[in-house]
Amino acid sequence: MKLVQKIAITYIRTRLSILAAFSKRKAAAEAFELFCTPAKQPRIPLSPLFLEAEPLSLTIEGITLAGFRWNKGGGRRLQIVHGYESASQKFEIYIQAFIQKGYEVLVFDAPAHGLSGGKQITLPLYIDALREVYRQYGPVQSFFAHSFGGLALVHFLETITPDTSARVALVAPATETSTAIDGLFKQLHLGPEVRKEFDGIVRGKSNADPGYYSISRAIDHIKMPVLWIHDRHDTITPLADVQPIIGRNNPQLRFLITDGFGHRRIYREESVVNAVTDFL
């Protein structure tokens, strides 16, 4: 962790600790704001691949989302869904691979990410964004998602009846929202009373407890083949969250467990790219 990040985290911990002493609710509300606000990422100049693409856009809840399309009218349509503090431009290797296969390829930056507008993102907002992409540019037969994008995609897919030939590839998906919240609270040194208020805020905004936003809950509602790739050493979305799903022996799910790629490196590994492109 960089020195600037350490200083910032120390300041936030101190501020929230003082705030929690006066109001657990206000401390929880500020923690929720932090949870939904991705760090600003430097703008990456568009590569030749993206400059050649057809630019797309759509608006959801007043936020303009930026997207791109390649090979319109291709034999099969693929959508790539990126994760938290990521962007579509980081998945060029997949875009190129599927263009070569003759697929139509769709990507959209999530709210508050990449070239899209907005300052915050929540899981329900990302799900709604995926639903709008599907409505305007679908149907989609092949889906690929990483990290938080995988969590959003699974929750979207459980609400639709997809093409009978549809397939899904998930790489290091964020399996349990509660685990992500646990990580935030551990990092910020916040106690159980603030967590109770935090969960209440989530419930008030979505009419559901954080535990509802779980791939473990939603995945069995998806009646299509799924390739799930996860690394043993993923510290962001731990394999421990995945093990109960593996143990259910759902015939729709095929698991590939890697060793040593972690969370951010995994989707760039050649063996993983090949497994995803072969499966889809």
Image (cartoon, rainbow, N blue to C red):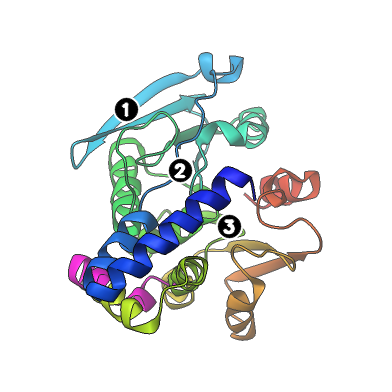
Can the viewer see residue 19 in this picture?
Answer: yes
Residue 22 in magenta?
no
Towards the viewer: 189 or 248: 189
For the stretch drawn in magenta, what is the main secondary structure?
helix
Instruction: Give coordinates of residue 144: x percent, y percent.
Output: 55, 49
* Residue plotted at (50% across, 35% down): 41
Q: Is residue 54 above or below residue 228?
A: above
Position of 87 with respect to 112 (left or right) is right
Instruction: Give coordinates of residue 165: x percent, y percent.
Output: 51, 54
Displayed quadrant of residue 246: bottom right
Tell me the mark number nearer the camera, choosing from 3 and 2. Answer: 2
Instruction: Give coordinates of residue 49: x percent, y percent.
Output: 59, 19
The residue that label 2 is drawn on is 39
Using the image, tell me which numbered label, if any, was put on residue 170: 3
Q: Is label 3 in contact with label 1 (beta carbons under 8 Å)?
A: no
The residue that label 1 is drawn on is 57
Position of 103 with respect to 22 (left or right) is right
The image shows a total of numbered marks equal to 3
Residue 202 in magenta?
yes
Residue type, mark 2 in image = Ala
Q: Which residues are magenta?
A: 201-214
Lower position in the chain sequence, tag 3 or tag 2: 2
CA distance for labels 3 and 1: 25 Å
